[in-house]
Image (cartoon, rainbow, N blue to C red):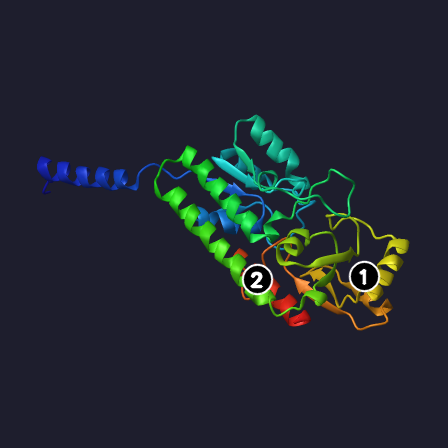
Amino acid sequence: MVRPSTTLISVVATLILGACGAQGPASPQVVATTSILADVVSNAVGRPVESLIPAGAEPHDYRPSARQAAAVADAALVVANGLGLEQGLETLLDGAEEDGVPVLEVGPLVDPRPLASSPEGVLDPHVWLDPLRMARAVRLVGERLAELDPTPPLPARADAYAADLEALDRRIADILAAVPPQRRLLVTAHDSLGYFADRYGFRIVGTLVPGGSTLAEPNPADIAELVRQMDATGVEVIVIEAGGPSDLARAVAAESPRPIRLVELFIGSLGPPGSGADTYIRMMETNARRIADALG
């Protein structure tokens, strides 16, 4: 048997060690709570980010699996929305923080607005429906990750994606320019579009169910008053969440003396591949086009 020379073994070992060293330290593992945050953060850091709440699932009452709990325990950073959105994850996230896992809740840090249909002091969790707030959130994620991993591309990549979201904001404004000011009236399934309405000059006339959660129950007297308000203001559309229930919206539309269109938007989750909403940027553009098509 021909034995490799000591010199050859040394060269091979050097190449192997050099290749391992070239990879550098492992990048910090990042986990996000929602499919929207996972997409946004993955673009900010340049690698896939796991979403605890799957696309299409209800964020308010989702319960994590044992594998997801383990992923959170091993994470270098968990990015959450906060403001009461991830009610089913609160125990997991609180426990992770107690164990020393950093949890960054971006919602409270991007100037949250009051929830219009809830008691005073309750803040609206739907901050992602304003691209400029999400641009600020992205930069906050970049800053926090830079503390964990000083690799230079991280803050620069986050800044570049934040600039993409600022460009998205301008495109949405251009798409919605087709909607005359007097027609910028919406009724929504629940109180979810406040940030979007504030940003692009719409008025939310009312909601089918109170508050910012899809788990709330409608009140018959409130529904009757909503129908009256719709007739008085000239509302033309009711916004419902893609994949969500539509029976109540159809019943309310049928009560109106004028034709009312139901417009499906992607609100709390990305859509499946081919939906036009499988990334945050495409989701927001699709929503804007659907509103413009309905009211333009």
Q: CA distance from mark 2 to mark 1?
A: 30 Å
Q: Position of residue 153 (x, y in %)?
A: 36, 44
Location of residue 20 with respect to 229 vertically, above or below: above
* Residue 46 visible in rendering: no
Which quadrant of the view contains residue 119? top right
Left-right relation of 194 to 27: right
Foreground residue among 82 and 24: 82
What amino acid is labelled 2 in the image? Ala
In x, y percent, where is residue 268?
A: 64, 53
Identify the mark at residue 4; answer none if there is no mark: none
Kindly state the secondary structure of the residue where label 2 is placed: helix
Percent coordinates x, y for residue 177 in the rendering: 60, 67
**Classed neighbour count for the residue bearing mark 1: other residues with Cα under 10 Å, few (<14), some (14–19), many (≥20):** some
Above or below, 52 against 259 in this view is above
Q: Which residue is mark 1?
A: 248
In front: 216, or 201? 201
Mark 2 or 1, nearer chain start: 2
Q: Is residue 60 visible?
A: yes
Question: 113 and 253: which one is in front?
Answer: 113
